[in-house]
Amino acid sequence: MSKATRIRQQNARERIAAQRAAARKADIRRRFLITGGSILAVVVIVIAFIVVKATQNSAAKSPTNPVGTALPASVIKDVTKVPASTLNAVGAGTAYAKSVQAIQGKALTSGGKPEVLYIGAEYCPYCATERWAMVVALSRFGTFTGLHGIHSSSTDVDPSTPTLTFYKTTYTSKYLIFTPVETTTEVGTTPLQTPTAAQESLMSTYDVPPRVSTKGAIPFVDLGNKYMVGGAQYNPSVLQGKTWSQVASALNDKSSAIGQGADGAANMITAAICKITKGNPGSVCGSPAVKGMQGKI
């Protein structure tokens, strides 16, 4: 075999070896990319799952979540079914005298029924305080659905007061219409509902000094345009540090500070509602505590 032939064969073997080496490297790179891509895909899925769960948990707990936290059935029962015997025993309790005031205006009605208008905000500690009394009172005339738990602003007076929200709730009654307007979220920066021009007009007419300390004070509650509440009817401090369950349970205790305050306020609201429903239903409006207060408001 000539030297030239041997050189050509050697070159051929080297080319084949180089091609095989390149092929092996390409195969290794391909396998690495496939494996790395699979791992990356798994990592992305895991991260996405974590983010979704964190977002869901944040939504459930976030102070900007306007719907609030779902409450146990026991809490809803305790706040909406306070026994008449407890309410009668409390009477006016420690609710502020004259916190329900008579006003003079054209009757506020909706669908042929007297209307109760509430304007407040989720961040407001006084609204937080008043909602407990309102739910106790209004539950004597009808039924709430969709009540959720929230807290008032953590940076306002009486911070993080446990309460309920009226946002996206439903209220049905044979005797009256309840119209709630929650204007902003718990942090007070995100709008929720905007009062109508007619509702704004009622506020500007009645929610002014000397009836309230500051014009436009909230909560503003107009009961058929015959009575109003401007602000909380009892001391908000009795709710500090309490859970929703503790507050709801205390409503059923005539000797508790919460029962004395919220139930006393609820009795005053009930007396005003009985005035605008013409004493209906009799089972509520004829109770001793309510009858005794009707002559005082």
Image (tube, rainbow, N blue to C red):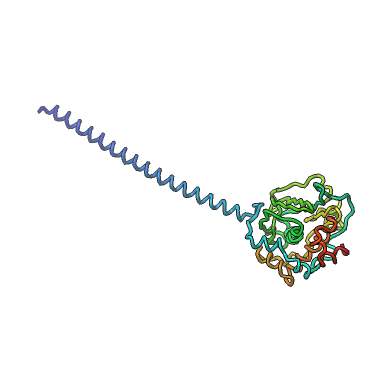
Eyeballing the image, is 81 above or below 114?
A: below
Q: Quadrant of residue 274?
A: bottom right
Residue 57, percent across and down? 57, 54
Q: Position of residue 188 (x, y in %)?
A: 70, 53
Please give left or right for residue 17 compared with residue 274 in the image.
left
Residue at the image position 84 percent from the left and 58 percent from the top? 279
Between residues 163 and 271, which one lies in front from this camera angle?
271
Left or right? Give the position of 240 relative to 10. right
Q: Is residue 144 visible?
A: yes
Q: Observer-nearest residue: 186 or 3?
A: 186
Quadrant where the C terminus is found in the figure: bottom right
**Identity of the residue furthest to the front in this view:** 282
The residue lying toward the viewer, choosing from 21 and 250, is 250
Query: What residue is rendered at 78% in x and 61% in y?
Result: 232
Q: Is residue 157 left or right of residue 271?
A: left
x and y, in percent, of residue 203 in the image: 83, 51
Question: How many circles with numbers are drawn on the protein?
Answer: 0
Q: Is residue 241 visible?
A: no
Q: Residue at x 86, y 50 (%)?
A: 107
Residue at figure coordinates x 64%, y 59% from the top left: 71
Note whether 285 is above or below 39 in the view shown: below
In this view, the residue farthest toward the bottom is: 255
Residue 251, image quadrant: bottom right
- Front residue of 13 and 48: 48
Q: Position of residue 220 (x, y in %)?
A: 80, 55
Q: Quadrant of the N terminus?
A: top left
